[in-house]
Image (cartoon, rainbow, N blue to C red):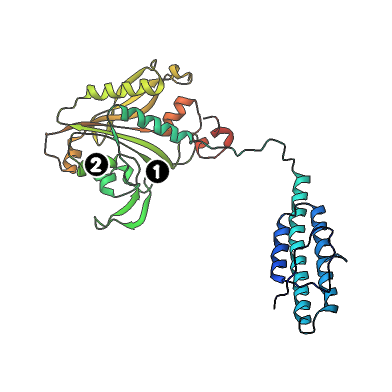
Amino acid sequence: MFLRCPAKKAGQSFNKASMQWNFQDIYDQAQVESQAVDSPQALETFRLKYLGKKGLVAAIFASLASAQSGDKAAIGKGANDLRGLVERLIAEKSAIISTAKIFEEQVDVSLPGTGETLGHTHILTQTMQEIISVFEQMGFVTIETPEIETEFHNFTGLNIPIDHPSRDAFDTFYLDAQDPSATGRRLLLRSHTSPGQVRIMKQNKPPMAVIVPGRVYRPDAVDASHSFMFHQIEGLLVDEKVQFSELKGLLTEFCRRFFGPKVIMRFRPHFFPFTEPSAEVDINAEVLGIQRKKWLEILGCGMVNPKVFKEAGYPKNKYKGFAFGMGVERMAMLKYGINDIRLFYENDVRFLKQF
């Protein structure tokens, strides 16, 4: 049963003889009042109101003397429940106030906050994005191709014969996985981005102008200029009428945009199985402030070999095209004066935050 108790005002004494207690209202009132407690002084006032010698719990027990015999058990239980509730509320508030006090003593909240250091794009990603942006402005489309390749796309389709040294296990990472499209052949980690040429030509008809960025893998010993994993960007343009002079003009414009208008270039003959004729492109080192050499190689290029067109399934003598490829790490090292490729992968913030 509920025995009603009117709300008690500050300083008011209890009339034990006429009092009735509504314990549910008292419980609710205690919880509401506890929410406003925010200091040790307020907590002590709250405790005294309910648990002090002249508090509400003591008044309820005192009313037992004048209560009817049938109400005494309910009144006693209500008083004990109220005391337990108030003690729990006091414990909770005491813990909160103590924690706040410790925090206030240890931390000066008036001081400026310490913000988190924001990261930024890695220098290799910046360089790759810059190269891609230049070619996209000249009409090229970016396409990504798989890092796990077949021997056909990585070698055969690019006119690299079966006895070529690059197909040896010392120069290529072969996987312990069979090529589902060729019996007795294994899959591998691509050793260059040139396999993208064959894949894209087999899936698309000219005209096309694409660039293929991505990671490549070679089992090289790691030193200042070599890494077993690095990044390349491949370029391919195919149409019915394409000339080597257009390749020279494209790469000259790219180098001027990437290295600056004062760059000095040269094209010298070279050999690649998948281009004919082929060339390597050098830039004058002195323009970049490098004194140890006069010329520095930056990329390889050439006209697409007709045998590559044949492997791609194109009609004989109908299309012409050119291709080029460059190492992203090398381009970044030349542009920013970095002399050790290992710095890109050591995650040294002192190095990375410079870019």
Near mark 2 (Cα within 10 A), the count class, few <14, some 14-19 or many ≥20, is some
| Residue 347, quarter of picture | top right
From the top left corner, tell me how far across and down residue 207 is, in percent: 18, 33
Q: Residue at x 45, y 25 (%)?
A: 335
- The residue lying toward the viewer, choosing from 134 and 47, is 47
Question: Is 336 left or right of 132, judged from the image as shown?
Answer: right
Near mark 1 (Cα within 10 A), the count class, few <14, some 14-19 or many ≥20, is many
Q: Residue at x 51, y 37 (%)?
A: 342
Looking at the rendered image, the disc whose residue lies closer to the viewer, 2 or 1, is 2
Element marked by disc 2: helix
Which circle marks residue 43 in the picture?
none
Element marked by disc 1: loop
Q: Residue furthest bottom?
A: 70
Above or below, 297 relative to 217: above
Q: Residue furthest top?
A: 262
From the top left corner, tell me how far across and down residue 14 is, in percent: 83, 67
The residue labelled by disc 2 is 200
Question: Is 280 left or right of 104, judged from the image as shown?
Answer: left
- The residue lying toward the viewer, choosing from 240 and 17, is 17
